[in-house]
């Protein structure tokens, strides 16, 4: 790779910066692909720190939540961000209807009217176009992400304009299925950690990331358990999580 789309830019113009090679290691041993992988991680967490026993006993086996990756998978994450499940499904249906076939080339060729009809907000339109441009120019390569460390995936993806830490983390967790992925910036995980671990306040992303260091290399299972714990809390309170 020779360039990468600059991060944080919100304008239509895309900037490029040099890209360093990504570190690779064996990918297969680091994936969560089935319930047996979740069970292995749960046993490891239970043995690692006693407080995980109570969480696991409460929620049981958490959902696997694997989803397809690639451009469509990342686009679905971008579309659903900060939307309710129902709203995300409605917008995604419009995106698939208007912007078909959903490819980087189709997004780059889409008119402003196409984008308006898709129901996407302007920031999400810009992000999808930035992702599409990065894929076409080769500065974003999904096949490279499959064999990279979580840190390298995070750095590689967040270099694309509009992709923030949460989006990269969700792709790492559910599209790639990396067992050590984690979403420290997710509010549900933060609140679950506060209640599960008896913290005085909801931890900030940096604080939760530091706490999660002790859960390596099973942070991906820890994240799923905390999401399940949060859902159980909301159900107890009569709220649909």
Image (cartoon, grey):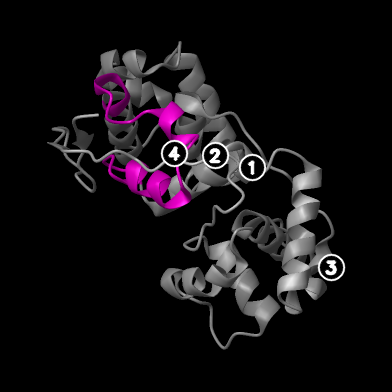
Q: Nearer the viewer, residue 162 or 48?
A: 48
* The N terminus: image quadrant: top left
Q: Which mark is residue 220?
A: none
Q: Earlier in the sequence, mark 2 or mark 4?
A: 2
Q: Which residue is mark 2?
A: 26
Within 10 Å of disc 1 (Cα), the crowding (few <14, some 14-19, many 20+) is few
Query: In this rendering, which labeled residue sits more in front, label 1 or label 4?
Result: 1
At horizontal 58% and vertical 72% (from top left) the residue drawn is 214
Question: Label 2 near label 1: C-beta < 8 Å?
Answer: yes
Within 10 Å of disc 4 (Cα), the crowding (few <14, some 14-19, many 20+) is many
Q: Which residue is mark 1?
A: 29
Q: Earlier in the sequence, mark 3 or mark 1?
A: 1
Part of the protein shown in magenta = 134-163
Q: Against 150, is 87 above or below? A: above
Q: Which mark is residue 78?
A: 4
In 3D space, how far apart are the residues under numbered discs 1 and 2 (Cα atoms)?
Answer: 7 Å
Q: Which residue is mark 3?
A: 58
In 3D space, how far apart are the residues under numbered discs 3 and 1 (Cα atoms)?
Answer: 28 Å
At horizontal 61% and vertical 39% (from top left) the residue drawn is 86
Please indicate, yes or no, whether residue 21 appears anywhere in the rendered image: yes
In 3D space, how far apart are the residues under numbered discs 1 and 4 (Cα atoms)?
Answer: 28 Å
> Does dot 4 land on a helix, a strand or a loop?
helix
**Is 158 placed left or right of 190 in the picture?**
left
């Amino acid at each position: 790779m020779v360039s990468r789309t600059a991060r944080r830019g919100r304008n239509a113009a895309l900037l490029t910066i040099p890209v360093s090679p990504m570190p690779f290691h064996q990918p297969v041993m680091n994936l969560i692909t089935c319930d047996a992988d979740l069970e292995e991680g749960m046993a490891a967490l239970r043995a690692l720190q006693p407080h995980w026993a109570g969480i696991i006993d409460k929620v049981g086996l958490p959902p696997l939540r694997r989803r397809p990756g690639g451009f469509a998978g990342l686009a679905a994450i971008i579309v659903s961000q900060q939307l309710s499940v129902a709203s995300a499904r409605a917008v995604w249906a419009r995106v698939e209807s208007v912007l078909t076939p959903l490819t980087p080339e189709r997004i780059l060729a889409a008119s402003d009217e196409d984008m308006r009809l898709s129901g996407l907000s302007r920031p999400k339109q810009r992000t999808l176009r930035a992702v599409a441009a990065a894929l076409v120019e080769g500065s974003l390569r999904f096949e490279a992400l499959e064999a990279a460390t979580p840190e390298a995936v995070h750095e590689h993806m967040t270099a694309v304009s509009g992709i923030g830490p949460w989006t990269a983390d969700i792709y790492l967790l559910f599209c790639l299925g990396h067992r050590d992925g984690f979403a420290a910036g997710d509010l549900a995980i933060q609140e679950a950690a506060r209640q599960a671990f008896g913290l005085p306040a909801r931890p900030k992303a940096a604080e939760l990331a530091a706490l999660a260091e002790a859960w390596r290399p099973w942070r991906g299972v820890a994240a799923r358990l905390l999401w399940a714990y949060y859902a159980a809390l909301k159900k107890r309170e009569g709220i649909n999580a």
